[in-house]
Image: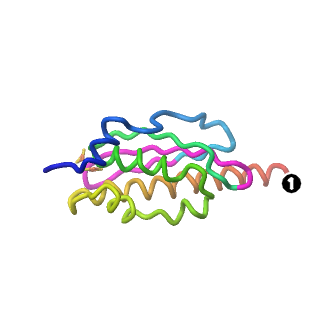
Amino acid sequence: MAYSDKVIDHYENPRNVGTLDKEDPNVGTGLVGAPACGDVMRLQLKISDDGTIEDARFKTFGCGSAIASSSLVTEWVKGKTVDQALTISNKDVARELALPPVKIHCSVLAEDAIKAAIEDFKKKRAARQAKAS
Ligand code: FES
Ligand code: FES
């Protein structure tokens, strides 16, 4: 099966690979797995107190489409608000990368990872606020 040029570009030059400090209260970590194939994606977002995504890093143990999907969403979410980032759907990712049907679940992983990272950030923030009050 042929990968699209955009998948190959992100696969060969992945953007924002790496780790953010998960002890940082402004960092949310999302770890998601694809039951279909066992691939795992970790996405971390650094979110300012006013809800803007300042930085993003990923590590993906998976196929080329999963790596490209995570690389792409790290670019998309930077500078967005949390609410804007939550509107990114796997369909946007699959369309941008021209993923074939058997690779759609790879883009689902990216959408799920964004949601999981934001959820983690919100949980941390709620815990912080509960402590402060
Ligand atoms: Fe596991 Fe995609 S099936 S790498
Ligand atoms: Fe499973 Fe891509 S994430 S084949």
State the quadrant of the C terminus.
bottom right
Q: Residue at x 38, y 54 (%)?
A: 109
- The verdict on residue 39 being magenta is yes
Q: Is residue 68 above or below residue 95?
A: above
**Residue under pointer 1:** 133
Residue 27 lies, in percent from the top left, at 62, 43
Q: Which residues are magenta?
A: 30-50
Residue 61 image offset from top left, x and y in percent: 34, 39
Along the horizontal axis of the image, is 85 left or right of 33?
right
Q: Is the shortest distance between ligand 2 and the CB of mark 1 under 8 Å?
A: no
Badge count: 1
Secondary structure state at the residue bearing disc 1: loop
As drawn, is 101 to the left or to the right of 9? left
**Who's the residue at 32% across and 48% down the image?**
66
Residue farthest along the right direction in this orientation: 133
Decide: is 5 above or below 91: above
In the rendered view, does 82 fall on the left or right side of 16?
right
Q: Amino acid at mark 1?
A: Ser
The stretch drawn in magenta includes residue 86: no
Identify which residue, 45 or 133, lies in the foreground. Answer: 45
Q: Position of residue 40 (x, y in %)?
A: 36, 45
Q: Which x, y percent locates residue 70?
A: 41, 47
Q: Residue at x 29, y 47 (%)?
A: 7
Q: Please tell me how crowded label 1 is: few (under 14), some (14-19), or many (20+) other residues with Cα within 10 Å.
A: few
Q: Residue at x 47, y 38 (%)?
A: 16
Q: How is the image coloured?
A: rainbow
Location of residue 42 (image quadrant):
top left
